[in-house]
Every structure is written in C-alpha cells, then in structure tokens.
Amino acid sequence: MMRTALFAFTLLTAPALAAPLTPQQIIEIDRIAADALKQTGVPSASIAVVTDGKLQFAKAYGRQRADATAPSTAVPYSVASMSKQVIGAALLLLAEEGKLSLDDKVARFLPGLTGAETISIRQLLSHTSGYRDNWPQNYSFPDTQRPTTPQVIIDRWAKAPLDFAPGAQWQYSNTGYVVAGRIIEIAAGEPLMPFLERRLFRPLGMQISDVHANRAGNAALPFTRYALGPLRPSPALGTNWFWGSGQLVATPTEWAKWSVARIERKLLKPASWAEQEREVKLIDGKGTGYGLGVFTDQVRGHARVHHGGAGVGYLSEDRVYPADRAAVIVLVNADFGDAHTTIADRIEAMVLGADPDTEAARALFDQLRAGTPDRSRYTANFNAYLTPQVIADHRESLSPLGEPQSFVRLRPARLRGGFTSEVFEVRYPDRKLTISMRAEPNGGKVEEFLIYPASD
C-alpha cells in the first residue's frame, strides 16, 4: 500500500547546497515532532536527518512500546513501500552484471503471466505495466490477515487482464513489485531476502529485517485508529503480503545509510543511480513523476528523490536531495494521520533553506498585519478589495498575535484561471491561519492574498 499525491512544481531558483541544521533548528524539531504526535494521536515518530552526506541528527519521540520504555532510534519500524527503491536497485545491480536488461520482457523469466511478451522489467518498476494492484486499500482486508505466497499473488493478479496497455498509463501496482521480486530470484539464483542482504545491505553495513521473517519482533508496536476513536492495535499481517513490494523493517539511522549510498553513488554505478532517478515517460510522452522505485521531482528548485510507505500500523517517509547531499527520514507506528509528512515537510524546509516564494508571501503578510500594504504588489482587483476597513481589520486582528512560530508553503504553485495558486500556513502557539494566494505568472502582481482562521 502507498498513499501518494503528484504535484507540478514551479522552479524559481537554482539549487544550493543544503544547510546543516542549527542548534536552534534541532530544538525546533522537538517541538514539531511533539506537536505532530499530539495533534494526530500517532504514538511515536523516529527521525534521521542527513546533511553533507553524513548522519547529522537522529531522535525518537513518543511511545514505541506497551510500557514506558524511553523512545530510541534503535527501535525498527516497517518501512513498507520505501522498500521498492531497494527492489529497483537490485535489478539495476543484476543489469550491471549482465544477468538481465531492464528492457527484457517479463516472459524471459515468467512466461505464463498476462502481457509477459510485451511488459518490460522497466515497466514493472515504473508502475506502467498495466498489472492491477493487489493491495490498493489503505486498510487490512480479511485476505491480508491470512498467510499467502508470492506465487498466489502472481497467479491472482498478474494473470488477470491488464488495466491498460503497457506504457500507456501510470498506476501504482504492488503486484508489479511482487513480479519484480520473483525475477530477482530467478536471475540471481537465490531467494530474495538473502540476495538483498548479501549484495546490498551487508556491503553498506545495514541491519535490515524482513517483516515476514520473525526477526522484527523488536519493532515499534503498530497501531491504527477508527475515525476519532482511541488507539487500537493493528491487525496482524499475513505472511508474504508485503513480499517484494514492502517487506523491509529498519530504523531511521540504518535507512540513512541507504540514503548516503544514493548521495555518494556507492554500491551501484553512478549511471545506475541516475537511471533509477530518471522520470519514466508514457508512450504519449507525458511524465509520470516516477523513476524505477522512486518518485522524482523538484522542490524549491532542488532535485528530490523520495518514497513513502503505508503498512499495517506504520507510515513512513524517505526524502533524498542528491545534489544537496541531504536526506530526511521519518517513521511512525500508526497507519493514520499525517504526522510523518508534516514532520518531513518542516524539516525539509529547514534543510533546504529559505524559499524565495515563501519569503515574498511572508513580507506581504507582515505588511498586512502592520496595516501598511504595498499596493504596488497587487492587481487593480485586489487593491479595490483592500478598502480602509479591510486594512484596519487585518491590522487590528493580526497585529496582537505577534510574530508567528512558522510560516510555510503547503502546496507548490498551480495554475488556475490564468493565475498561480498557492497555499501557506501560519502557526502561532494557540492558533493556525491559512493563506490563499493567487498571482500573475512569472513574478507578476498578486490577485489574491486572503487570510483565514484554520483548525488543527
């Protein structure tokens, strides 16, 4: 399972090397994590941050165990679909050794599957194969609580009719990664997990477990929640449901070694890492926002390679900024809420530094709360909106709040009605505001800058 959203990012600035976290920012991470856990009800979070190609910060928060044991970054979590990039890397490694090609058809290894003569390994890894996802739900349905095998999954979903012609669409498919895992076994001549341990994890000094192999008994306890009810233990996961598509268990510090390998271009050839991070195009030339086991995009003008995971009782987020030599990893032991992405968003902003768009919006906000808007920044429409009463209301309601704790952009610019549309969040100790901003493209005048109260 994996929940994801794809955005089109507007690139306004050239990348700069990510800044190391300051002591003040590290203190701020404590507040961010505490707030995210409190507001969502998620029991715990475990975090690692890489800057300059090295692990700079790691800390765990909240309740990982049934007792009052202090949280520790040594406690592992299921990382679920974050595992897919490892499967992609394993196939790239086998391709380097000449044991297969990413353009080989599935039929070379598994001839009995639907579309095997036309679907390539590359299409399996890029979610463009057409195989229907065997687990699209964001909850554990009855079958997933009983043991299965990779072959049962393949027989049920990879021998069914395709959802679309290979390469014609992008559709997230765990099934494709179960098929990919079997191809690894056939090409390598050994079971999947021993191969991953021997060829990928051991060379990087990584201690990684398999969620299906009873070696993860020390993992953080998994929890779920129904609507706004109390925490409940997650249902037990049936063996092999995550096989190939999300079976790894790791601590954030161990996973950071994988992020550093990506940054340093270790283990695989640099060309193979680049191949994994290259966006795959559809037959019609449209982008997918996805490479070979990773999402690939730009944020604030910085290249980002990332993947999240949603397991039974766990959510995870892994973001790497290769050119900036930085990474952010957040793991939580609950399958609800957005604590993992909220924490990652805030740390990402710290690591990548100031965003010119956010700074410009903050300047407009400060002017309005002072009652002194710079009318040269606005269109005729919004200048007409800013009557003396509107300006006075802004000053009298916002000025007493003082300096905000944080001012962040929640969504990159999108086009709507000929204007760019952005959303910002302003946080104070006891309240949150949302700003809807619309402006003429290419740095033009602002058509809308509306400030609303928001609930947590």
Image (tube, helix red, strand yellow):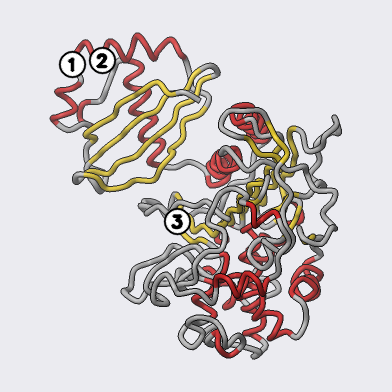
Quadrant (top left/top right/bottom left/bottom right) for the N terminus = bottom right
Q: Three-letter amino acid code at disc 2?
A: Ile
State the SS at label 3: strand
Label 2, on which residue?
391
Which one is nearer the viewer's eye here, 192 or 75?
192
| Image vertical order of residue 152 relative to residue 70, above or below | below
Report, in whole angstroms, how far the alpha carbon at label 3 lies from the one at label 1: 38 Å
Label 3, on which residue?
298
State the SS at label 1: loop
Name the residue: 78% across, 38% down: 64
| Image vertical order of residue 245 relative to residue 11, above or below | below
Q: Three-letter amino acid code at disc 3?
A: Gln
Label 1, on which residue?
387
Q: Three-letter amino acid code at disc 1?
A: Thr
Q: Which of marks 3 and 1 is nearer the N terminus?
A: 3
Residue 215 % position (x, y): 85, 58
Q: Residue 18 carries which label?
A: none
Residue 49 % position (x, y): 67, 48
Q: Which of marks 3 and 2 is nearer the N terminus?
A: 3
Q: Is residue 56 visible?
A: yes
The answer to whether 1 appears left or right of 231 in the picture is left
